[in-house]
């Protein structure tokens, strides 16, 4: 899955950052290398961009680009689309 | 051979251990660091109050060198300190990003620094150390300032452990609280005597090391230096150079080598190998230097609580609107008394000069050209000071990043950055401070685009023109429709729509640029540092006075000459365009004759054929020429042209406009002409100060020329459509 499909409050581990070279290079240089933990902590009121917590720092990228960040959901919360609203209407969580 | 190469060669010849110097004058120290780490505060604290503002070689990014003074030691040679723009890494893609590496390494026409001071955020250590690793790999003599140490007071990382890890001096500082600064100065002085080089050696994958060897072989002659530095440069080239970069001055053979390597990568991800190796090292060492990511939790939690309100869909926008309202209100009305004071003082001084000095050309020049011109410059200061006061507060507190976050969705659709919002809003008050405010945007392309459309916003100087036209030519109400009020609102709506459309069009044509993905850091909220705010206000004002002010002054004198020469008779015209007082009808008539006979008047006649299709006559033409000094001057110029003396009451001029007839007896100023004239003023770049300040910010006359050309063309076409279209409809 990708970060664009995240729900607020969920935690993930980065698998790979893709996309245009300067974008992925910048994200990786900010510490979003494979194995790093990220948490979606907010969505801008107009629905875009998204706000993530990475290495104790709050970073914001747009949904369109969050599609390039491949992640796995951390531990317990996995496959649980229940409480928090889905950011992008992923279609899989029935919201 | 250019200066950079010469400097590098000189530096290469110096014996190891000796400070390497750029120009043979004062040793140069550069301050490097991520954004939001308090680098500017460190700079201000180190240099005191003596920074000048210049430019980095070849780009319009500002370079602020200051002098470092050492206490206690009687160092004869002063040290120059330069604040390098904040960056997360040295790898670069755009010309602006290239500044950091050029400034740090002394490439591309920049002097080579003797020492770099890396300012790092003690609470964001791992990410900050990434940049420090790059500096060490490039063998830049380095001192680390472990800044904002007060924010992690409960569990601070140990400078000693960091020193052991990196092999360079580390000083714990809090620039805002003045902690550790004399120790930092001592380290800098010591570092200049014995340049400290880091000891970190990263183990990159074997395959990557082989690739780097190929790149090192392709490095241009002027990049040749020690093996370690060449290795660092090869790493930089590998992660920076590709087909789509905008880097300047990269050797073609190095480019070719990079292209070859990437082509041969065969599924390997070279960027990933470099960056992941560095982060793996930092993550491994994190325990040793006693840092985790949790120590920041308390501050983060506080910021998150604030964000829950400030980024809330309803409260967040309400507060945002309120903040913007305050900024806007301040520019619009709080600045007003000061502006009036400047205007009144100028008028008073002009009156005094007229009374005291004998009538003549010199007196006129002094009064209308020079004093009037200086007044035209100073009159912008209240708004500039106020706007930068707010911008500094917004930036320092961390709210500016939130504005970008909130408004990104809207601004993105215009091809603009979220940070363009505050400058654009300021454009409603005055384009001059608004254009200066585009400095908060990092990318040159975004700044340029924002600058080019700001003058289309309805600034306050257009209001007197609109008021005159609307009041003279339109009824207050038509039936139950409040015509005058509606027209005023319509002009605002029109200007917003045109500005947005122009941004969309220019952004896709003249000022093209890739839509760079947004990567925005939302820094923790902090209490702004007022000293820094005051310094920023003063610095921006002095830059404006020195660099844009001179152009504005010169333009005022030229305009004065244009509307005063050749003289109608032997006697001088006793009153100026701008300052009008107690003039009797005789004087008014004389002034009218002077202007009519002047080059400006003749120019008005000459351009009449061009203005006729818009419904304007030569007198309006002269008014438009005069309005170049400032749009509101249109009103007083029209007063002079129609020989109206008393300027205090707008009634006579309005009456006069209504009575003005064309040669065939039809009224000249119909509502349609009024509308055409307002549209013209809404779109035309009738403001020399805007052009002067654009020239200052872009460092070329090309962009102000383009701004003038496209806005004037737009204005002419729109007025033409309105007037001719209206006539077709029988208006």
Image (cartoon, rainbow, N blue to C red):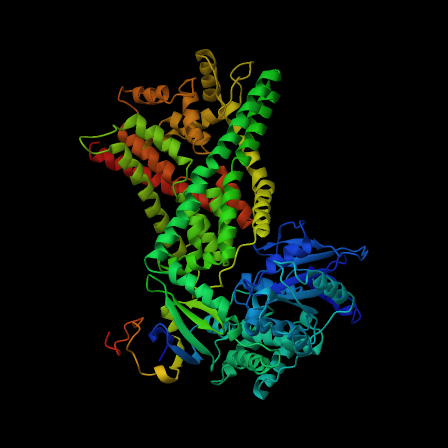
Q: Quick check: B607 above or below B589?
A: below
Residue B710 visible in the current orientation:
no
- Nearest the eye: B405 or B424: B405
Q: Position of residue A94 (x, y in %)?
A: 23, 77
- Nearest the eye: B604 or A91: A91
Quarter where residue B136 is shown: bottom right
Q: Position of residue B267 (x, y in %)?
A: 47, 85
Residue lying farthest to the bottom in this orientation? B206
Q: Quick check: B629 above or below B566?
A: below
Residue lying farthest to the left in this orientation? B479
B646 lies left or right of B164? left
Count of numbered marks: 0
Quarter where residue B239 is shown: bottom right
Q: What residue is shown at x 49% (from left), y 69% (from top)?
A: B298
Q: What residue is shown at x 51% (from left), y 22% (from top)?
A: B576
Quarter where residue B140 is shown: bottom right
A56 lies left or right of B353? left
Q: Position of residue B542 (x, y in %)?
A: 60, 43
Q: Quick check: B279 above or below B552?
A: below
Residue B192 visible in the current orientation:
yes
């Amino acid at each position: 899955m990708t970060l664009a499909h995240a729900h607020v409050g969920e935690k993930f581990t980065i698998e790979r950052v893709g996309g245009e070279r300067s974008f992925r290079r910048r994200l990786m240089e900010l510490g979003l290398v494979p194995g790093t933990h990220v948490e979606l902590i907010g969505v801008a009121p107009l629905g875009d961009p998204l706000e993530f917590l990475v290495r104790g720092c709050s970073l914001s990228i747009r949904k369109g680009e969050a599609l390039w960040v491949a992640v796995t959901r951390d531990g317990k919360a996995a496959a649980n689309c229940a409480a928090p609203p889905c950011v992008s209407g992923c279609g899989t969580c029935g919201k | 051979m250019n200066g950079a190469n010469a400097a590098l060669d000189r530096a290469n010849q110096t014996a190891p251990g000796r400070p390497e110097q750029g120009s043979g004058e004062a040793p140069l120290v550069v301050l490097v660091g991520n954004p939001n780490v308090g680098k500017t505060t460190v700079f201000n604290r180190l240099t005191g109050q003596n920074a000048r503002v210049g430019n980095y070689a070849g780009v319009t990014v500002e370079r602020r060198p200051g002098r470092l003074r050492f206490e206690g030691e009687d160092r004869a040679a002063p040290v120059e300190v330069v604040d390098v723009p904040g960056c997360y890494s040295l790898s670069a893609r755009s010309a602006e990003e290239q500044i950091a590496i050029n400034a740090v390494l002394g490439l591309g026409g920049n002097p080579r620094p003797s020492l770099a001071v890396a300012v790092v955020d003690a609470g964001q250590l791992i990410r900050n150390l990434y940049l420090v690793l790059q500096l060490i790999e490039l063998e830049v003599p380095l001192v680390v300032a472990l800044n904002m140490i007060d924010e992690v007071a409960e569990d601070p990382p140990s400078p000693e452990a960091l020193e052991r890890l990196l092999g360079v001096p580390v000083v714990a500082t809090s620039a805002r609280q003045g902690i550790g600064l004399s120790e930092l100065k001592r380290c800098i002085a010591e570092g200049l005597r014995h340049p400290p080089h880091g000891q970190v050696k990263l183990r990159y994958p074997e395959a990557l090391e082989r690739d780097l060897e190929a790149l090192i072989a392709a490095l241009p002659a002027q990049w040749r230096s020690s093996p370690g530095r060449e290795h660092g440069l090869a790493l930089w080239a590998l992660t920076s150079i590709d087909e789509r970069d905008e880097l300047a001055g990269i050797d073609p053979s190095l480019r070719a080598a990079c292209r070859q390597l990437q082509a041969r990568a065969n599924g390997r991800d070279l960027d990933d190998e470099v960056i992941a190796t560095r982060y793996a090292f930092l993550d491994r060492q994190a325990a040793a230097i006693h840092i985790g990511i949790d120590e920041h939790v308390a501050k983060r939690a506080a910021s998150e609580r604030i964000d829950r309100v400030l980024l809330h869909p309803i409260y967040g926008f309400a507060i945002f609107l309120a903040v913007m309202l305050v900024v806007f209100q301040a520019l619009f009305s709080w600045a007003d008394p000061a502006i009036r004071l400047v205007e009144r003082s100028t008028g008073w001084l002009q009156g005094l000069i007229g009374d005291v000095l004998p009538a003549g050309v010199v007196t006129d020049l002094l009064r209308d050209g020079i004093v009037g011109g200086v007044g035209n410059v100073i009159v912008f200061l209240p708004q500039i000071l106020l706007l930068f006061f707010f911008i500094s507060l917004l930036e320092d507190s961390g709210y500016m990043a939130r504005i970008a976050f909130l408004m990104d969705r809207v601004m993105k659709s215009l091809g603009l950055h979220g940070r363009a919002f505050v400058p654009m809003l300021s454009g409603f008050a005055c384009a001059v401070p608004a254009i200066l405010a585009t400095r908060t945007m990092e990318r040159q392309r975004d700044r340029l685009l924002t600058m080019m459309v700001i003058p289309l916003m309805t600034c306050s100087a257009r209001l007197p023109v609109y008021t005159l036209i609307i009041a003279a030519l339109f009824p207050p109400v038509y039936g139950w429709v409040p015509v005058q009020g509606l027209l005023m609102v319509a002009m605002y709506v029109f200007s917003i729509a045109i500005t947005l459309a122009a941004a969309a069009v220019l952004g896709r044509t003249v000022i093209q640029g890739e839509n760079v993905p947004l990567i925005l850091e939302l820094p923790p909220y902090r209490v702004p540092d007022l000293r820094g705010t005051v310094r920023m206000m003063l610095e921006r004002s002095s830059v404006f006075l020195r660099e844009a002010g001179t152009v504005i002054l010169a333009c005022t004198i030229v305009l004065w000459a244009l509307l005063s020469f050749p003289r109608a008779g032997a006697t001088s015209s006793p009153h100026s365009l701008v300052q009008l007082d107690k003039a009797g009808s005789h004087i008014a008539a004389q002034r009218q004759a002077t202007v009519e006979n002047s080059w400006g008047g003749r120019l008005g006649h000459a351009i009449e054929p061009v203005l006729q299709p818009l419904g304007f006559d030569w007198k309006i033409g002269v008014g438009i020429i005069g309005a170049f000094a400032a749009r509101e001057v249109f009103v007083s110029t029209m007063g002079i042209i129609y020989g109206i003396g008393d300027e205090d009451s707008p009634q006579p001029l309005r009456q006069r406009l209504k009575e003005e007839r064309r040669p065939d007896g039809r009224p000249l100023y119909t509502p349609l002409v009024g509308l055409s004239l307002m549209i013209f003023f809404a779109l035309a770049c009738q403001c020399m100060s805007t052009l002067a300040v654009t020239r200052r910010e872009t460092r070329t006359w090309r962009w102000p020329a383009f701004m003038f050309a496209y806005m004037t063309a737009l204005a002419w076409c729109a007025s033409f459509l309105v007037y001719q279209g209206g006539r077709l409809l029988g208006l």
